[in-house]
Image (cartoon, rainbow, N blue to C red):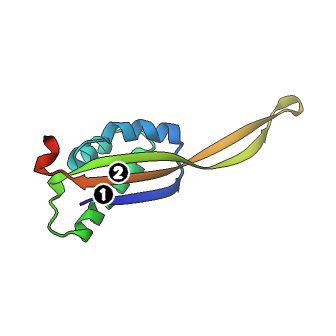
Amino acid sequence: MEARARIRNAAVAPRKARLVAALVRNQYVEDALSQLRFTHKAASPVIYQLIQSASANAQYKDPSVDISDLYVKEIRVDEGVTRKWIRPRARGMANRILKRHSHITVVVDEESEDDGE
């Protein structure tokens, strides 16, 4: 039973979100949530909510699914829109500011007995 959750244009840079995504990839949902709860990164609360949402979606699709058997099958961080503006600097120069956003997709799946073979 595969279930997914997605957030678009999250205000986290994709490069920074990929670091957090690599921590929880291929882990059980309970372990991933406890790992994210104590990770001090800006993307941690966003990915935490996404994993919770994906596991709730799995329960909604099939009420007989056991949360302890769910694992993070796939977590993908893609680049979203980039907000650009200019900050004035000394001597008439200007610096460009890029505020990057992310599209994050989480897929959880139920681990079955025949997956280990």
Q: Is residue 38 visible?
A: no
Residue 21's disc is none
Tell which residue pokes out farthest to the top in this image. Answer: 91
Q: Which of the image's four quarters has the N terminus? A: bottom left
Q: Quadrant of residue 21?
A: top left
Q: Where is residue 90 shown, x and y percent of the image? A: 84, 30
**Is residue 103 rendered to the left or right of residue 94?**
left
Q: Quadrant of residue 49?
A: bottom left
Contact flag, marks 1 and 2 (Cβ < 8 Å): yes
Which amino acid type corresponds to the residue marked 1 in the rendered image? Gln
Which residue carries the number 1 mark? 52
Which amino acid type corresponds to the residue marked 2 in the rendered image? Tyr
Q: Is residue 24 above or below residue 106?
A: above
Residue occupying the point 32% across, 41% down: 25
In the depicted view, which residue is nearer to us: 113 or 94?
113
**Is residue 102 rendered to the left or right of residue 60?**
right
Q: Identify the secondary structure beneath mark 1.
A: helix
Q: Residues within 10 Å of mark 2 (few under 14, many from 20)?
A: some
Q: Where is residue 68 shown, x and y percent of the image? A: 15, 53
Tell which residue pokes out farthest to the left in this image. Answer: 113
* Number of numbered discs overlaid on the protein picture: 2
Q: Quadrant of residue 37?
A: top left
Which residue carries the number 2 mark? 48
In the depicted view, which residue is nearer to us: 78 or 29?
78
Q: Where is residue 65 shown, x and y percent of the image? A: 16, 63
Q: Which of the image's four quarters has the C terminus? A: top left
Q: Is residue 53 visible?
A: yes
Q: Identify the secondary structure beneath mark 2.
A: helix
Q: Is residue 107 above or below residue 44?
A: below
Residue occupying the point 30% across, 65% down: 57
